[in-house]
Image (spheres, rainbow, N blue to C red):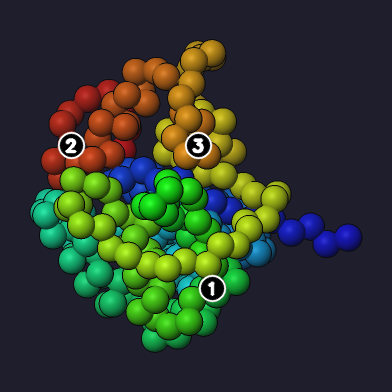
Amino acid sequence: MKVVWNISFAGCGFRSIYYVGALSCILEQVPQLLHGAAMFGGASSGCLVAAALAVGIPIDLLHHKKIFENKTDTFLYTLRHSLLEKLPQDAHLRASGRLCVSLTRLADGQNVLVSKFDTREELIQVLMCSCFFPIYCGFKPPSYHGVVSLFPLNTITMAPFSGESDICPREGTFNFFEAHYGNVSIQVNTGNVYRVCTSFLPPTLEVSGNGEM
């Protein structure tokens, strides 16, 4: 029986740069883990990494300077500009069935998973909706009438916070306390407090400290 697996990326603000390092190591050590994945899923900034993998954008192009620009009031504008620049014209065709984007429906707070995109513009709109963070990105969220789908089991999870994800930072001591954000388990420790706080800051504005990028 052929083994099928998927890879998902948790939302993490500007700490999505962690994924660039992790994916570079995977490509160097076990490239088949990425090349053989059936689907890529993600929420918030994690969906941008998943989208890049689904449509075939090279890892070294994921760290796009414009996305890390320190203008929170125009974040969605700069994000849209970057997506228009980097996504190929047939991105929606490549992404359909290979990309699963997690959205939160404003009306009832329910999770919606979208994996079919009829146009490139629709794909961009879905990614922007997933990346929207109230107040930080503005007060009027972008809208999209998504199609509910199911993200299959046997999924390798990635997150830049130490916890129960398959690929994540490891702390030196075992910790019994954890918090849950969406479907992500995050240990309550000083390292994660630093990571969570700096996830709202572009890398150029991070204060010095003991936490890693």
Q: Quadrant of residue 213?
A: top left
Q: Which amino acid does label 3 sit on?
A: Val
**Regarding mark 1 in the picture, which secondary structure is present there?**
loop
Circle 1 sits on which residue? 116
Circle 3 sits on which residue? 184
**Regarding mark 3 in the picture, which secondary structure is present there?**
strand
Relative to 61, does residue 88 appear above or below in the rendering? below
Give the total number of marks visible in the rendering.
Answer: 3
> Which residue is the extreme one toward the front?
107
Q: Quadrant of residue 80?
A: bottom left
Q: Looking at the image, which residue is at 27% across and 77% down?
A: 85
Label 3, label 1: how far apart the Cα atoms are? 24 Å
Q: Nearer the viewer, mark 2 or mark 1?
A: 1
Q: Which of marks 3 and 2 is in front?
A: 3
Circle 2 sits on which residue? 206
Label 2, label 1: how far apart the Cα atoms are? 37 Å
**Residue 99: % across, % down:** 53, 66
Q: Which of marks 3 and 2 is nearer the N terminus?
A: 3
Q: Which of marks 3 and 1 is in front?
A: 1
From the viewer's side, name the closer residue of 31 and 47: 47
Q: Earlier in the sequence, mark 3 or mark 1?
A: 1
Mark 1 nearby-residue class (10 Å; few <14, some 14–19, many ≥20): many
Q: What residue type is labelled 1?
A: Lys
In this view of the protein, can residue 24 be seen by the observer? Answer: no
